[in-house]
């Protein structure tokens, strides 16, 4: 029974490794106005795994990531054709409220962006937004612990979130995102503004977080993808139509993508022949 | 080969050609020019603050002596009467500025939210922004004439209400433009964070943009309040003046600015002294409101 299911899955989509899918992103076309930004990409996202998006600049990694919680809806000219299912529901269905989608699918941005509030209020923000009635202090502590920041800030919870260092701010943003216990965490180059020590802490944190969450991370840094991602999706840029359109070249277990890529383009990219 | 190239090049690196002199040369042309310009900016900065400090000095010297409990509580004296004060004018000014604030802050704030966040590039926003800028330079007496026609004529009486509306017309553009400015400077990444948390647009505005922009918004409101408290021209047509305490918002009302205007032109020493004291009180009111607002709205984080 299991074997049949597996073979079926392999036949249907070679990039799918097993069941237990949280999200399934099937992009046909993503437009910004008339500009075709991404085409034909199928990205299944599995539970309790980290999926890394790598690829050269302008390949649409961030666009795809931001389509997963409808953040791109904030851009008026954005248009999505295709389907993104979250536990079987299409989040682009007309009946779906993007605001609710974003409460289940949290996001950590490239630049640390705490609110100009106290550290405590930053973390409690999402809980208050969702009218959380339980023990707020406990949840704030849990989230800050989860983001490996508690010991550094426990004595100054009333200080401004903006008074922290860059790396601490980014971990504060992660704490803020996980305080509401979202199902999926999207991270858009979360370490690009951080120094190596802070980057290492955030990476360690991601590996801990995947016990409870599913993470999709865009990274410009291939070593980072190798260190943290279970699955890696390599996206390329198609310039054949006179425009720059991103598409999924290859997706699979991280080790296989880096050691035994099936596509020539992937091999060149992971060897650092272009970027 | 390359090493010998480097050594042969090295003398040309010595830009001063002679000694490696690092000491200052204070009488060199560029040093003199720099010193002159620095001195000039310093003098101009002092000059710019002369009017402000001389006005405050005059007010303290001339008005301070008459500023006592009677002056700020009693009713204005008649022609040859001694003593008296301007209690009714203080109350009148506070009430009318209060009415104006209650009208202009909500309108201004919502207009600014529209301009800054909801639809910054729409035709309506561009028009409103342009009109607000024009209105900041609007002659204040015309606001008085406008409200005279709109309210005093129709209600058949000068009133505190009409005075408040006239002041609100003058405060509105300052508040709109300052609040818009304060809200547009809230970083986009902060708004993105709020949207990413699953905030509706209203929640982003009320819970992130407004609190973050609050110091700037309050500064704008305080500028508008300070300006309105000192206005006299629009009140001439709308609130007029009264020698009695305010008992109803629909009757003529005293104000500090009109009292100063009336009394300073009178040939009696008592009234002139009271005009000085009233000027000092007006400045103090604006100062206290300003400090309070800054204290409440200071950037906490």
Image: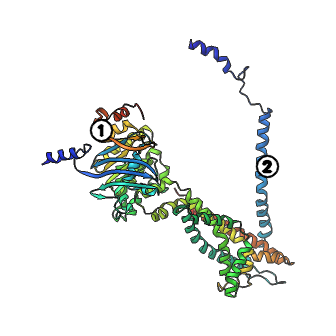
> Which numbered disc, 2 or 1, marks the residue closer to the eye?
1
Which picture quadrant has residue B155?
A: bottom right
Chain under numbered label 1: A
Tell me how the rendering is colored: rainbow
Residue under label 2, please give it: B43
B113 and A172: which one is in front? B113
> Is residue B218 positioned above or below B159 on the image?
above
Percent position (x, y) of residue A158? 46, 56
Residue A154 visible in the picture? no
Q: Residues within 10 Å of mark 1 (few under 14, many from 20)?
A: many
Disc 2, SS: helix
| Quadrant of the frame with the N terminus of chain B | top right
Residue at the extreme left: A1
Q: Residue at x 40, y 44 (%)?
A: A246
Drawn side of residue B119 relative to residue A36, left or right: right
- Give the Cα distance between marks 2 and 1: 68 Å
Chain under numbered label 2: B
Q: How many marks?
A: 2
> Is residue B287 positioned above or below A80 on the image?
below
Residue at the extreme right: B267
Which picture quadrant has residue A260?
A: top left
Percent position (x, y) of residue A273? 40, 30
Residue under label 1, please give it: A254
Drawn side of residue B98 relative to residue A136, left or right: right
Percent position (x, y) of residue A229? 32, 41
Q: Residues within 10 Å of mark 2 (few under 14, many from 20)?
A: few
B164 and A43: which one is in front? A43
Percent position (x, y) of residue A187? 38, 48
């Amino acid at each position: 029974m299991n074997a049949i299911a597996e073979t079926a899955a392999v036949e249907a989509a070679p990039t799918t490794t097993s069941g237990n899918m949280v999200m399934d992103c099937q992009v046909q076309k993503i437009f910004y106005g008339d500009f075709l930004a991404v085409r034909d990409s199928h990205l299944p996202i599995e539970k309790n795994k980290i999926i890394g998006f790598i690829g050269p600049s302008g390949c649409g990694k961030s666009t795809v990531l931001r389509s997963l919680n409808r953040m791109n809806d904030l851009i008026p000219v954005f248009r999505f054709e295709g389907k993104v299912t979250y536990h079987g529901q299409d989040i682009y269905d007309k009946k779906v409220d993007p605001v609710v989608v974003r409460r289940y699918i949290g996001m950590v941005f490239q630049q640390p962006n705490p609110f100009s509030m106290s550290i405590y209020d930053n973390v409690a923000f999402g809980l208050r937004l969702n009218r959380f009635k339980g023990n707020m202090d406990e949840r704030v502590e849990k989230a800050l612990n989860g983001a490996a920041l508690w010991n550094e800030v426990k004595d100054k919870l009333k200080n401004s979130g903006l008074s922290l260092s860059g790396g601490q701010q980014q971990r504060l943003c992660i704490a803020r995102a996980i305080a509401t216990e979202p199902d999926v965490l999207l991270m858009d180059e979360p370490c690009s503004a951080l120094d190596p020590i802070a980057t290492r802490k955030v990476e360690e944190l991601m590996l801990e977080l995947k016990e409870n969450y599913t993470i999709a991370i865009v990274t410009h840094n291939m070593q980072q993808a190798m260190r943290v991602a279970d699955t890696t999706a390599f996206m390329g840029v198609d310039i054949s139509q006179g425009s720059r359109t991103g598409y999924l070249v290859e997706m699979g277990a991280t080790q296989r993508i880096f050691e035994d890529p099936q596509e020539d383009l992937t091999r060149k990219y992971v060897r650092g022949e272009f970027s | 080969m390359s090493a010998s190239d480097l050594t042969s090049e090295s003398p040309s690196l010595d830009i001063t050609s002679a000694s490696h002199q690092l000491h200052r040369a204070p009488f060199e042309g560029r040093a003199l020019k720099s010193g002159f310009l620095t001195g000039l900016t310093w003098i101009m900065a002092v000059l710019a603050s002369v009017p402000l400090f001389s006005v405050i000095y005059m007010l303290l010297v001339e008005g301070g002596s008459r500023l006592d409990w009677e002056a700020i509580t009693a009713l204005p004296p008649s022609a040859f009467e001694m003593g008296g004060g301007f209690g009714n004018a203080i109350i009148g000014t506070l009430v009318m500025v209060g009415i104006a604030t209650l009208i202009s802050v909500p309108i201004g704030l919502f207009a600014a939210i529209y301009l800054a966040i909801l639809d910054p590039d729409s035709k309506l926003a561009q028009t409103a922004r342009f009109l607000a800028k024009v209105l900041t330079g609007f002659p204040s007496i015309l606001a008085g004439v406008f409200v005279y026609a709109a309210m005093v004529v129709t209600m058949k009486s000068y009133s505190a209400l009409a005075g408040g509306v006239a002041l609100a017309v003058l405060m509105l553009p300052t508040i709109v433009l300052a609040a818009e400015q304060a809200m547009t400077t809230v970083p986009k990444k902060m708004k993105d964070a709020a949207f990413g948390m699953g905030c509706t647009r209203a929640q982003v505005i009320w819970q992130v943009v407004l609190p973050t922009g609050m110091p700037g918004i309050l500064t704008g409101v305080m500028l508008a309040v300070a300006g309105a408290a000192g206005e006299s021209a629009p009140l001439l047509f709308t609130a007029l003046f009264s020698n009695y305490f305010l008992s109803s918002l629909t009757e003529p009302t005293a104000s500090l600015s009109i009292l100063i205007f009336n009394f300073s032109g009178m040939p009696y020493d008592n009234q002139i002294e009271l005009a000085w004291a009233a000027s000092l009180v007006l400045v103090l009111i604006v100062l206290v409101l300003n400090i309070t607002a800054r204290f409440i709205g200071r950037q906490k984080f």
